[in-house]
Structures are given as structure tokens and as C-alpha cells.
Amino acid sequence: MNEEKITFTEWNLEGQIVTKEDVIGALEAVFELAIQENDLEFLLKAIGGIARSNGMAQIASELTLDRASLYKSLSPSGNPSFFTVVKVLDNLGFKLSIQQKQAS
């Protein structure tokens, strides 16, 4: 039997999320998956990756936060306040909104 060896590498968002449409698509997918899997770490890692792609130092400066603290907050082991997440998304040009789920 000829078995093919498959290797996986970790997906890195940096440099992959370029346009606003890319960010919207990534955030929608990440939010949905994070909720389904109850995985806040995945959500924070994705938001952190998107923020790094858009210049974490600039975002931290505009939010009057320490860059290192923002990196730590948006890491998988971070615990940012909801307000911090909302401010980062706002700085990236997005806002959170609430929609009623459609009946299934």
C-alpha cells in the first residue's frame, strides 16, 4: 500500500487578511465557529491576528493602550474586557451588532 504522508502547519492570519471583505469574512466565520465550539481562545487568536495584520502598535496607540498589553489581551490565553474587543473592532472599522436568530 502506498501511503501518502500529510503534514499540517498552523494557519497564520497575518498577511492573509488584507481587505475589509477579508476581515468581514474571517470574523463572521470565526465568531460562528467560536460560538459553536465554545472556544473563546480561538476567537481571541483570530482577532489578535487581524489586529496584527493591521498594525497592532498603531491600534494600541490610537486606543491609548500599551502595545504589549494589547498583544497579551488578544492572545489565546488573554482575557480582554468586552470593551477592549469592541474598541479594537471599532478601530479596524467594524462594530458588533445583534441579530435575532432565524427559527430552524
Image: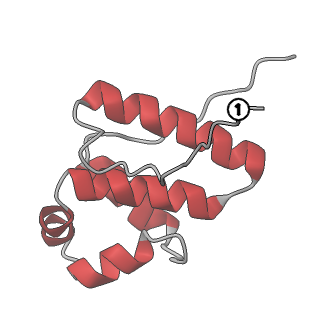
Whether residue 70 is situated above or below residue 17 in the rendered picture: below
Q: Is residue 93 above or below residue 61?
A: above
Residue lying at the far front of the rendered structure? 1
Q: Is residue 97 visible?
A: no
Secondary structure beneath dot 1 equals loop
Q: Residue 30: horizontal and vertical position, in percent?
A: 55, 42
User: On the picture, is 75 further left or further right than 39?
Assistant: left
Quadrant in which residue 31 is drawn: top right
Q: Position of residue 37 (x, y in %)?
A: 75, 49
Total numbered badges shown on the rendered structure = 1
Q: Give the position of the N terminus as an image quadrant.
A: top right
Residue at position x 45%, y 53% in the image: 46
- Point 53% across, 70% down: residue: 76
- Is 58 on the left-hand or right-hand side of 13? left
Towards the viewer: 61 or 56: 56
Please tell me in which quadrant of the rendered image residue 72 appears: bottom left
Residue 102 in sight: yes
* On screen, residue 96 above or below 58: above
Quadrant in which the C terminus is drawn? top right
Q: In percent of the image, x 42 and y 68: which residue is there?
A: 74
Specify few, some or many for label 1: CA neighbours under 10 Å numbering under 14, 14-19, or 20 or more. Answer: few
List the single residue furthest toward the right. Answer: 104
Residue occupied by mark 1: 2
103 relative to 19 in the view: left or right: right
Position in image of residue 94 (x %, y %) = 33, 39
